[in-house]
Structure formats: structure tokens, C-alpha cells
Amino acid sequence: MVFGSIRLRTAYTEFQDPSASEADRDVYGRMEDRLAFAGEGALPGPMGAQCTHGAVFSGGHAAVQILAGLGKSEVATLKDMHGPMGLDVPALVEVMATGRLSRKRERPA
């Protein structure tokens, strides 16, 4: 995935053991130094159980954390406190599809 001039490396792994607890999901989803883990297994139960949706939200959330850690102000365009994982889903989809956000997004009041 590319955001502006930053290329984020991605990989996939399955971690959705039926016996996984919420504590397991919390540990799995934590960043370790500059390494972010994402996937449906890294989200709380109901959201993570959505598989593809959970993986996308988790990956977007991890990317926002990485970009924020790099001090990238553009990351604010991907945030929406009312969206899943604090994400502006239409903005995330646009960035994933094109590598950029074409316009400023209006924030709901």
C-alpha cells in the first residue's frame, strides 16, 4: 500500500482460533517497535469476526498508527471518531485504491 511517498509493506496470516480470547486479540494487535500486526484476529470479537472487513479495518488502523508515528500530518484525513477503529472508511478505501486522497473530506459535526 502506498500513501503519498510512503510505501507500507503488508503480509497476511490467519489468526482466528475459535478459542482465542479478547486478551489474545489485544496482544496480537499491539505494535512492537516499528512492526504493526493487523488482521481479523487483531480486532475485538464482533468486529474481527467479519473476516475481510476486520482485516481491512485492522490494516488501516495499523497504517494510521505507523504514519502518525512518522509524524505525517496527512494521517488526520483517515481518521473519523465515529467510524470503525476510528477510521474514515470512504477515505481509507480511496487511499487503498489510488494511493492518495483526492479531496479534503467534510467532517460531520
Image (tube, rainbow, N blue to C red):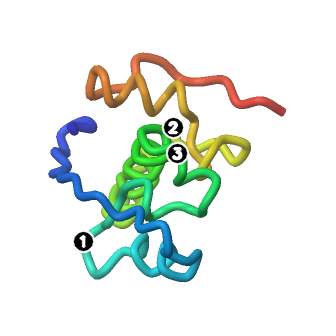
Q: Which residue is mark 3?
A: 76
Q: Position of residue 79 (x, y in %)?
A: 57, 44
- How far apart marks 1 and 2 lie (CA) works out to 22 Å
Of tags 1 and 2, the one toward the viewer is 1
Q: Which amino acid type is shown beneath numbered disc 1?
A: Leu
Whether the residues at callouts 2 and 3 have beta carbons within 8 Å, the answer is yes
Up/down of 49 relative to 99, above or below = below
- How far apart marks 3 and 1 lie (CA) works out to 21 Å
Q: Which amino acid type is shown beneath numbered disc 3?
A: Ala
Q: Position of residue 95 (x, y in %)?
A: 36, 29
Q: Position of residue 71 (x, y in %)?
A: 37, 60
Up/down of 28 relative to 3, above or below = below
- How far apart marks 2 and 3 lie (CA) works out to 4 Å
Q: Which residue is mark 2?
A: 77
Front residue of this view, candidates 12 and 84: 12
Q: Which mark is residue 1?
A: none
Task: Assign a secondary structure to mark 3.
Answer: helix
Q: Is residue 74 left or right of residue 46?
A: left
Task: Assign a secondary structure to mark 2.
Answer: helix
Front residue of this view, candidates 81 and 14: 14
Front residue of this view, candidates 53 and 59: 53
| Residue drawn at the location 58% of the way across and 75% of the way down | 22
| Residue drawn at the location 49% of the way across and 74% of the way down | 20
Of tags 3 and 1, the one toward the viewer is 1
Specify the quadrant that holds the C terminus. Answer: top right
Task: Assign a secondary structure to mark 1.
Answer: loop
Specify the quadrant that holds the N terminus. Answer: top left
Q: Which residue is mark 1?
A: 35
Callout 2: 10 Å neighbours few (<14), some, many (20+)? Answer: some
